[in-house]
Image (cartoon, rainbow, N blue to C red):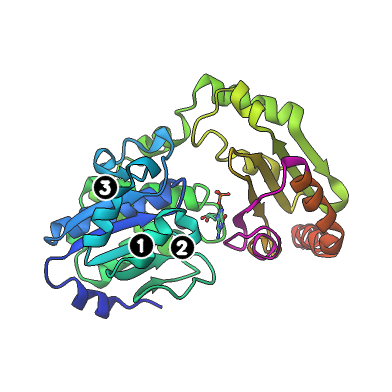
């Protein structure tokens, strides 16, 4: 549902706007938020972007990064003041209050009108206005679409275009997931026309590894990768002390799951990580197997059919055991996708 006419009405006079996005924002979460912020400021609104947690250093180049308010439990009043005084709260790249942690209760109790701009499946019905499409490749694509619907494409400047580019690039796995439609490529072409240096953005995001991160990936690949051919599955289970050993920073485990999915014959990949407050799961699949359903049925999670996440309050070992105990019931489906792939390749 894309309520752009209603949103046009809503934004036709200056408003106090808060933009927020999901816990541990990725390039789409932060990029779509900052691009929308850039647009709304140009339209005369006063805007504050508030994130529920910190985010990776490789996103700091985005214009507006220095003005982002990172929610901190100990300084909560600052964020609460913005949220309570806002006329409108835009919720980008998430669809349930649980995804913004402690900010959830503050946003929920604010009298501000809530606008959801998102592409995750099965949104919770908390928003007053919705600009949602589960088929969109990225929330950044939806921000572009919304600006186009509002006849304001000429307001997209290079910094906004860079943020949109980064969101689409990362959420499509650098333009290779099935969500990469012709329209995605056309939007990207427009962004390059505006002046985006696409190669610079790839370098900023993918070629900014620290030595620790690269060595951690090497360690995980050589010592931690588990391959279960009978389930067409590969996964990593990483302890907190292993993260500490490599001085792991926010964002350092991002992308690890894709190495497991890149294995021939693998239709589901997982990274199970011990975090201080919970165990976090990151899931990927190729083909028809829905890791969104798997995450929401068993690990309080959600996301997309081929990319999802969830959590567990059991220990790492118990979570891994639970994960493994679920596999037999999915064996046929996991193998089916692999057999389909082989048959498609033969045809
Ligand atoms: P990632 O594995 O990159 O953290 O997340 C993959 C996708 O699943 C993203 O679209 C992310 O927003 C979503 N996701 C990750 N963790 C959770 C979770 O705990 N709950 C829900 N609902 N979605 C999640
Ligand atoms: Mn996204």
Magenta span contains residue 191: no
Per the image, label 2 sits on a secondary structure element best described as helix
- Residue at (65%, 39%) from the top-left corner? 274
- Mark 3 or mark 2: whose residue is earlier in sequence: 3
- Residue at (42%, 71%) from the top-left corner? 132
Q: CA distance from mark 1 to mark 2?
A: 8 Å
**Residue 75: x and y, percent?**
32, 42
The residue wearing badge 1 is 107
| Visible residue check, residue 192 | no
Quadrant where the C terminus sits is bottom right
**Residue 345: x and y, percent?**
75, 57
In contact (CB < 8 Å): disc 3 and disc 2 = no
**Residue 88: x and y, percent?**
25, 66
The residue wearing badge 3 is 78
Between 213 and 239, which is closer to the camera in this rendering?
239
Query: As displayed, is residue 123 above or below residue 36?
Result: below
- Mark 1 or mark 2: whose residue is earlier in sequence: 2
- Does the beta carbon of the residue at mark 2 sit less than 8 Å from ligand 1? no
Between 212 and 311, which is closer to the camera in this rendering?
311
Identify the mark at residue 97; answer none if there is no mark. 2
Magenta residues, start to end? 293-317
Between 188 and 162, which is closer to the camera in this rendering?
162
Per the image, label 1 sits on a secondary structure element best described as helix
Per the image, label 3 sits on a secondary structure element best described as helix
Badge 1: residue crowd in 10 Å (few <14, some 14–19, many ≥20): many
Residue 139 is left or right of residue 147, and the answer is right
| Visible residue check, residue 199 | yes
């Amino acid at each position: 549902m894309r309520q752009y006419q209603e949103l046009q009405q809503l934004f036709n006079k200056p408003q106090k706007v808060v933009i927020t996005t999901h816990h541990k924002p990725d390039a789409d979460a932060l990029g779509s938020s900052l691009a929308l912020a850039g647009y709304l400021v140009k339209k005369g609104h006063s805007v504050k972007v508030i994130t529920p947690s910190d985010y990776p250093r490789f996103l700091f180049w985005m214009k507006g990064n220095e003005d982002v308010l990172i929610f901190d439990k100990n300084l909560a009043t600052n964020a609460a003041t913005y949220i309570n005084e806002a006329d409108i709260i835009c919720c980008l790249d998430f669809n349930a209050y649980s995804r913004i942690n402690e900010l959830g209760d503050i946003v929920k109790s604010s009298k501000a009108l809530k606008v959801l701009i998102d592409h995750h499946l099965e949104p919770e019905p908390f928003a007053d206005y919705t600009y949602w499409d589960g088929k969109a490749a990225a929330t950044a694509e939806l921000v572009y679409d919304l600006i186009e619907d509002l006849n304001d494409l000429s307001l997209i400047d290079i910094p906004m275009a860079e943020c949109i580019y980064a969101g689409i690039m990362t959420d499509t796995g650098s333009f290779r997931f099935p969500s990469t439609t012709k329209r995605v490529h056309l939007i990207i072409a427009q962004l390059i026309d505006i002046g985006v240096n696409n190669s610079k953005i790839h370098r900023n995001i993918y070629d900014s590894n620290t030595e620790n991160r690269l060595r951690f990936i090497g360690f995980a690949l050589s010592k931690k990768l588990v391959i279960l051919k009978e389930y067409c599955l590969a996964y990593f289970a990483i302890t907190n002390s292993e993260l500490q050993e490599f001085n792991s920073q926010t964002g350092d485990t991002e992308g690890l799951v894709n190495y497991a999915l890149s294995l021939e014959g693998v239709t589901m990949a997982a990274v199970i990580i011990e975090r201080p407050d919970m165990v976090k799961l990151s899931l990927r699949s190729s083909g028809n197997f829905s890791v969104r359903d798997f995450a929401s049925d068993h690990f309080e999670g959600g996301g997309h059919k081929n990319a999802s996440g969830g959590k567990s309050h059991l220990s790492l070992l118990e979570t891994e055991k639970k994960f493994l105990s679920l596999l037999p019931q999915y064996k046929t489906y996991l193998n089916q996708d692999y057999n389909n792939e082989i048959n498609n390749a033969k045809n």
